[in-house]
Image (cartoon, helix red, strand yellow):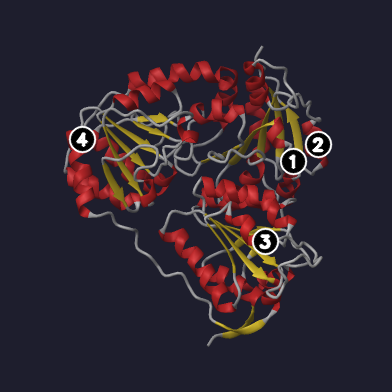
Amino acid sequence: MGDALTGGELVVRSLAAHGVRLVFGIPGTHNLELYAHLDRHGIRHVSPRHEQGAGYAADGYARASGRPGVVVTTAGPALLNVAAAAGQAQSDSVPLLVVSPGMPRAHPAASAGHLHEMPSQQRALSGVVERSVRVMSHAELGRELADAFAAFRARRPRARYVEVPLDLLAEAAEADVPAAPEAAPALAPPAAIAAAAELLSAAERPGVIAGGGAAGAAAALVRLAERIGAPVITTANGKGTVPERHPLALGARINLPAARAWLEACDVVLAVGTELGESDLWGPPLGLSGKLVRVDLDPLQAHSGNVAAVAVIGDARPALEAIAAALGEGERSPDAAELRASLDEEHRRRAAPWLEWLAAIDGVLDGEAIVAGDSAMCCYYGALGALPVQRPRSFLYPTGFGTLGYAVPAATGAALACPDRRVLALSGDGGLMFTLPELAAAAALGLALPVVVFVNDGYGEIRNEMVDAGFAPVGVELAPPDLPAAARALGCAGAHAADPGALGAEIEAAFERRVPTVITVPEQRRA
């Protein structure tokens, strides 16, 4: 048997054994047994100002690094605070682990008036994350934690929740610390590889779609696209998988009507690591006239949205390498310039209010920078298609769940994960107000973080939808406070940029500071 460990130390030892070196969370009366062991096992703790911010920070950490993000909360309201962030990670296939205490094992089914008591934390989270469990022994606790990290390594990464009853957290017992087994990449069946290669080799009008599941296969995807001469368009989560200045790159503009028309006219489409969902396409499933080849780790995605003619189920990198090898030597050199120009023109019309500002941002970011965007008009109409990204995991954006308040805490997590890279947050004033206190957390960490805020006095997208529906706007006209002054009150710097030239200069100055800088810019409102 192993050492005598409390449940709390077993959790911390398991995290350390699986390579976790940083967790996000807020201490509370019920989780102190977890906090007692973090420092001794080499795990750094970062305190946000709200558990939702902790979840977004862990999400940003995971997206930028490719390693799991971990959140430790206390029971009851703290756990519910993190639920929105867990839902976002679940939606976007981000490896996120949430650990919290729960009521004691002998707690009665009826309410007993305990602090933070609720009918069932486990059931509440089961509707949000991939797996939600309440463990009842040291052995079960160790197994569940090991299984979580095994899933993060070898299966489609999603969000998980492990609840540890209060008495188990404090109870000492002899316990082992199971380790998730090392797993080789899941290899697709040779027959599927051969069938995919056959379709792609015969294609006259091929196209490629890269989703978030292609992030670890960027080089292999570029080589295959060059081999078959296929332009590559990406989803929001796939942005940067192909460097967006590559001749075959069409950017993260799959939501444009011109992109849909092109894909529907391709005779073969290769989709890698994507659901092809409504939140990717901004509309119904593609009406493909040609054959669809899907490469995905998750077999449930073989026919999601669109039915695949060939489903290559396995890890994307070895699958794409095997398909390229089956195609043999050679390279086609199509001209994607005309298609890219069509997409550029269509996007310019949609993104006009933000283009000059985004060009100023691009002018001061190097090719290694990370941008964390909120679910804001400046991001989904603007930066998604107009701010070039040259590598995967560099544009962090809350796609499927579409939460607000993501940008600042996600940028904080990304900056901690990648301290050698510049990180910038991009938000609207409505979204920023959801997690404004997280500026104080980033300031305490000494992060040189520009936070560019497009101000349109509330919720501009919903305001426009109300007007388009023919009724007067309600609850969307929200004049923001003096955001630069609010930033200064939270230990940050603040500035206003009246024009794109001033914005570029303010961002450069912000990267020289050791605290975040909120930079407001005016957003043109629709008449």
Q: Amino acid at mark 3?
A: Ser
Which label lies toward us, 3 or 2?
3
- The local secondary structure at tag 2 comes to helix
Name the residue at 73% across, 71% down.
108
Count residues near mark 3 (Cα–Cα under 10 Å), then give few for <14, some for 14-19, many for 20+: some
**Residue 411's quadrant in the figure?**
top right
| Mark 1 lies on residue | 436
Disc 2 to disc 4, how far (Cα)?
55 Å
**Residue 350 vertical position relative to residue 293 in the rendered view, above or below:** above
- Dot 1 lies on which element? loop
**Residue linked to disc 4:** 331
Disc 3 to disc 4, C-alpha distance: 58 Å
Question: As drawn, is 148 to the left or to the right of 169?
Answer: left
Pick the front one: 223 or 134? 134
Q: Amino acid at mark 2?
A: Ala
Instruction: Tell me the crowding category of disc 2: few under 14, some 14 to 19, or many 20 or more residues within 10 angstroms, Cα based.
Output: some
| Marks 1 & 2, CB-CB < 8 Å contact | yes
